[in-house]
Image: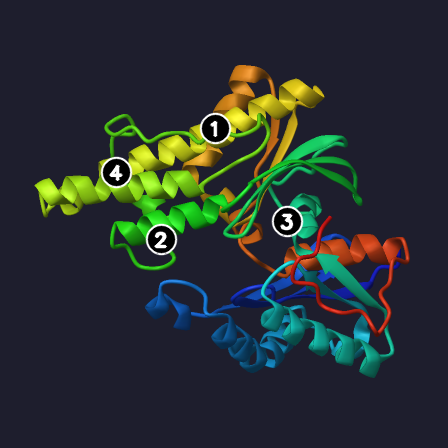
Amino acid sequence: MGQKNCYILGIESSCDDTAAAVINNGKILSNVVATQHIHEEYGGVVPELASRAHQQNIVPVVHQALRKANIDKNQLQAIAFTRGPGLMGSLLVGTSFSKSLALGLGIPLIDVNHMQAHILAHFIEAEGQTAPNFPFLALTISGGHTQIVKVTDYFEMEVIGQTIDDAVGEAFDKSAKILGLPYPGGPLIDKYAKEGNPKRFKFPKPKVGPLDFSFSGLKTSVLYFVEKEVDQNPDFIEENMADICASLQFTIVDYLMDKLKNAVKKTGIKEIAMGGGVSANSGIRTALKDAEKKYGWKTHIPKFEFCTDNAAMIAIVGELKYKNQMFAEQNVAANARMKF
C-alpha cells in the first residue's frame, strides 16, 4: 500500500447525490458530486426519481473524477462503494456499477458503511484538517441519522446514543417546510438564524435517555406554535422568520450539546469529531468550538465539502480497508438498513 501511485476510486450513491472521488495515499485528487435538483419541487427526496437520476449521472461523474485526477481507469487499484445505509434504489445503482467496474478491471471491490465513512472522513489529508486520536466520540448528524459513536479504532465503533424516532436533519427540513421554506430547508434556517434572536421563542427539548435523541415532538411543537400564532396574525411567519429560525436552531443545538456533555461525562473521552450533513450548520460548529474552550475538549470539524454526502469519505475508507486487505466478494448486496 506504500507504493507511490496507489489509486482508489470511491463511489457514493446512498441518497440523492451521485459522487465519485479518487484518492492516492490519503490525498484526494478529485471529488465530484452531481446534486439532484428535481426533488426540490416535491419538498423531499423521491426514491424512484433519485435512483433514475443516479443511473443518468454515475458514468459522467466517474469519468469526470478520473479526468480531474488525471488518471486512466486502468491505473486504479480498487473500487470502494457505499453499500448502505440509504435508499435501496439509489444504493443498487452504485453497487451494481461498482461491482461491474471492478470485475471488468480485475481489481478488488471494497464495500463501505456510509455512516462509518462520515466519521472516517476526518482522516482525509486536507489543509486545516487534523485527524482525531483514538479513542474519540463522533457525533454523526444528518438527514437520516443522529448518533453518538465511541470510536476505538478505524473499524471498532460502538453506537452509545441515537435518535429513537426522527433525525436532526429531518427536524430542520420539516420545520422549514412548516415555515414555508423550500427544500432543503435546513441551510435556510441556518441562514435566517444568523439574523435573529435565539431567545425570542422557547421550544421544548424532548426528554428521553441521557444519550438518546428524539425530534418528532419538537416538529409537532413547531407546527402547533406556528398555527396558533398565524391564527392571530396571518403575517406572523414573514414578520418573525429570523427570530423563529434562531430560536429553533438554538434549541436543537443546545439539545445536541446536552447529549454530548452526557457522553463525555459517561466515557471520560474529551476528543470529539463531528460528521454528516448537519455538521455544516454554523450553530453547531460554533457551539462545539465554544465547548472546546469551556470544557477543555479537543474538537474536530470537517471541511464543508466532506460534511454532506460525498465520495471522498468513501475513498478514504476504501484506502484504509485496502491496507488491511478487507475486500468484498462479487455477491455482496446493497443493504438499506446497514448497521455499524
Q: Distance between the residues labelled 4 and 2?
A: 13 Å
Numbered label attached to residue 118: 3
Q: Quadrant of residue 2?
A: bottom right
Q: Distance between the residues labelled 1 and 2?
A: 25 Å
What residue lies at 33% left-to-right and 36% top-to-bottom?
Answer: 248
Q: Distance between the residues labelled 2 and 3?
A: 21 Å
Image coords of residue 99 (percent x, y): 77, 76
Image position of 323 with respect to 40: above or below: above
Q: Helix, strand, or loop for circle 1?
A: loop
2 and 3 marks in contact (CB < 8 Å): no
Image coords of residue 185 (percent x, y): 35, 53
For label 1, the residue is 207
3 and 4 marks in contact (CB < 8 Å): no
The amino acid pointed to by label 1 is Lys
Image position of 124 with respect to 252: above or below: below
Where the N terminus falls, by quadrant?
A: bottom right
Image position of 59 with respect to 334: above or below: below
Numbered label attached to residue 244: 4
Question: Which is more N-terminal, label 4 or label 3?
Answer: 3
Give the mark toward the camera: 1 or 2. 1
4 and 2 marks in contact (CB < 8 Å): no
Numbered label attached to residue 185: 2
